[in-house]
């Protein structure tokens, strides 16, 4: 008589809960596509500069800058900034009013407003003594996964001249951003437009960005090797000027010594470096920089002291 093997009936398999996809992030502003790479490179320095920063309140601060250079007359700048109560992020506070005036009376001013939760506005004014040079108005809308910006530069209804710039960025994935820029200019007897396409890919430790259009191309690559070392490579080509430039920069941070070292070398045979040193417990930062252009046989150096 054969044996019978009895199996217990299997119940229904547990259902997997649907995987929630994280929403795509906002791509940010078009002007900040190459920011990570550009922050690696040192800023040009020439002459001696003294900067004194003073925080007057939680909303208002001023700074005084005295600059002595062998390339021109000594200069003085008064910088004032007001920040409101609406803080969206550590770097975004609304409303914000920033002004900078030099000893000749020339003024650079910016006003940033938050008109709605997603709508920002900015106005920029620049004067040379009593003459207006630039007046610019920006409107930016930030959606969940896209950013649209419209800029009007030097609008003149009487002279029938204007510069219009439209930007659009869209996050396709969590790492890939695509978009474009359209620049339109009009003045009596002249009218034209330039279209530029842009793309940005962000990995864990590196970011690659490309802008390409009829006016030329701009590519950058940023890599963070570790907490102390960052490098950047930049390529720029201008079809109108028939000029191409390749640059390599690096950023070395030494937290134990409160030091930051930045350097660069480019295809124009120019090398440069800037060393910054903080002096705790004093609120003082010292900076020493030198730049040498082998092709033109030009050398300049600079030293700055920042207090506050």
Image: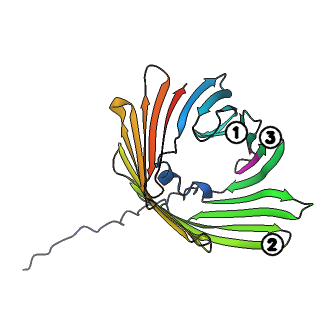
Query: Which contiguous range is marked in magenta?
Result: 113-125
Pointer 1: what residue? 94
- Which residue: 57% across, 67% down? 198
Classify mark 3: helix, strand or loop.
Answer: loop
Q: Nearer the viewer, residue 103 or 167?
A: 103
Q: Earlier in the sequence, mark 3 or mark 2?
A: 3
Q: Earlier in the sequence, mark 1 or mark 3?
A: 1
- Which residue: 37% across, 62% down? 14
Estimate the x, y position of residue 183 in percent, counting from the top left: 71, 67
Tell me if 301 is positioned left or right of 112 in this view.
Answer: left
Classify mark 1: helix, strand or loop.
Answer: strand
Q: CA distance from mark 3 to mark 2?
A: 29 Å
Say above or below: 235 vs 42.
below
- Which residue: 56% across, 32% down? 49
Estimate the x, y position of residue 2 in percent, counting from the top left: 8, 79
Pointer 3: what residue? 129
Judged by its main secondary structure, the magenta piece is strand
Pointer 2: what residue? 190
Q: CA distance from mark 2 to mark 1?
A: 38 Å
Quadrant the N terminus occupies: bottom left
Classify mark 2: helix, strand or loop.
Answer: strand
Q: Earlier in the sequence, mark 2 or mark 1?
A: 1
Tell me if 260 is positioned left or right of 5 in this view.
Answer: right
For the residue carrying disc 1, how many other residues have a C-alpha within 10 Å: few (<14), some (14-19), or many (20+)? some
For the residue carrying disc 2, how many other residues have a C-alpha within 10 Å: few (<14), some (14-19), or many (20+)? few
The answer to whether the residue labelled 3 contacts the one labelled 2, judged by CB atoms less than 8 Å apart, is no
């Amino acid at each position: 008589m054969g044996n019978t093997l009895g199996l217990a009936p299997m119940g229904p398999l547990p259902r997997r809960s649907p995987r929630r996809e994280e929403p795509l992030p906002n791509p940010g502003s078009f002007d900040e596509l190459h920011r990570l790479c550009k922050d690696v490179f040192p800023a040009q320095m020439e002459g001696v500069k003294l900067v004194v920063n003073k925080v007057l309140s939680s909303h208002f601060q001023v700074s005084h800058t005295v600059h002595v250079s062998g390339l021109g007359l000594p200069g003085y700048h008064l910088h004032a900034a007001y920040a409101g109560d609406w803080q969206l992020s550590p770097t975004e506070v609304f409303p914000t009013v920033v002004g900078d005036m030099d000893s000749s009376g020339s003024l650079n001013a910016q006003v940033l407003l938050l008109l709605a939760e997603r709508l920002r506005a900015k106005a920029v004014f620049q004067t040379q003594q009593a003459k207006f040079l630039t007046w610019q108005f920006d409107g930016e809308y930030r959606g969940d996964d896209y950013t649209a910006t419209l800029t009007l530069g030097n609008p003149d209804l009487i002279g029938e001249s204007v510069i219009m710039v439209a930007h659009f960025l869209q996050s396709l994935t969590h790492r890939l951003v695509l978009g474009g820029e359209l620049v339109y200019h009009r003045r009596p007897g002249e009218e034209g437009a330039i279209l530029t396409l842009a793309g940005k890919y962000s990995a864990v430790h590196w970011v690659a960005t490309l802008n390409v259009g009829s006016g030329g191309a701009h590519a950058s690559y940023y890599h963070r090797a570790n907490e102390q070392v960052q490098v950047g490579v930049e390529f720029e080509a201008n079809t109108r000027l028939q000029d191409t430039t390749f640059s390599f920069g690096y950023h070395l941070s030494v937290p134990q010594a409160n030091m930051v070292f930045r350097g660069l070398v480019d295809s124009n045979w120019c090398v440069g470096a800037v060393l910054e040193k903080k002096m705790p417990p004093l609120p003082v930062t010292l900076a020493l920089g030198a730049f040498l252009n082998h092709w033109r046989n030009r050398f300049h150096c600079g030293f700055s002291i920042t207090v506050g």
